[in-house]
Amino acid sequence: MTALALLAGVLLAAPSAARERDPKTLSSYAFDASRPAVDRVEKIPDWLLKNWREADSNPGYEAYLPSKKERAEFAAALDGLPPRLKETLNERLIAFYFVKNLQGNGITDWVLDDSSRTYCTMILNPAAFNMSVSELLTARERSAFRGAADIAVEAGGDNGILYIVMHESTHAFDYVRRLTPATEGGHAKALGLPVPDGWDVWRSYGVPRPEDDFPARERLTFYGFGGPKLDAAEAPAACAQLARSPFASLYGSRSWAEDAAELFVARHLTCDLGRPYRVRCGGKVREPMADPRVSERAERILAPLYAAEP
């Protein structure tokens, strides 16, 4: 999930700080580029935690530091990423922050230095450590429906943190290297980048072209943000509509940034890690990467992420 709210303006710092902190400015953070990204797991600063509590209207967010076992599971997920993606995290990822009770699985946000180079922070939900990647993806898709929707994702028994690492790291790469025209509008505006009216199968950032859209998509919400708006009984129809689209998942149909991240999840699981990735819904099974429309888009859009050289 990209940043859902633009945390603009100057916000109050932690009591120990003499100056105010801007979450979009690199100097607000204790960034140490000499450490590999895997060693940048840090306690979220109090001032930043406060910002996100307010942005999501959720006072229950709590700082969390993973256990030794969880750190090992997290490191394994990072280690399996493609080299170009790991290189980008090593260069531009400020820190990984874990936050209990996070509404959603993760948040990747942009930060600029004095030269307008883009860096990122990443917030991850530690609840994923207690779920398999299949359970986590199933819960995510079911969150779009009221009641027990007949939808289940089979993506292997790996720890659920694998999904968050895959998805959020793609957003980080997109911010820094640009898989899509704009990962998030505020970032493009801050850099003075033009955002085209359309891109690939998208008529605009959050609206596909008519021939690639599907009726249920307009009512899709996830993780309790503004919904759910669909009844559980509507899940089979929504899945059937998705199967006729070029998107890897229901979640991937939200915007072109989520589309790119979900294409990487599908490709990384099946092609890089040799894991299954199939969705059972309403008695039917869909394997996203077995769909030529999805696999062609994944190979083309994600090509910079797999490039041997910058």
Image (cartoon, helix red, strand yellow):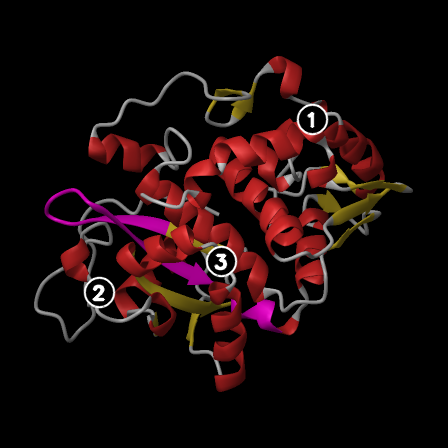
For mark 3, give the secondary structure.
loop
Q: Secondary structure at mark 2?
A: loop
Q: Amino acid at mark 2?
A: Ala
**Label of residue 296 in the image:** none
What label sits on residue 245 in the rendered view?
1
Q: Which residues are magenta?
A: 109-129
Whether residue 4 sits left or right of residue 115 in the image: it is right
The one of 52 and 275 positioned closer to us in this rendering: 275
Mark 1–mark 2 distance (CA, rounded to whole Å): 41 Å
Give the labeled residue for mark 2.
33
Is residue 101 visible from the viewing direction of this image? no
Viewer-side label of 1, 2: 2
- Rendered image: mark on residue 81: 3
Which of the marked residues, 1 or 2, is nearer the chain's N terminus?
2
Indicate which disc, 3 or 2, sits on the residue closer to the N terminus.
2
Residue at image coords 55%, 45%: 264
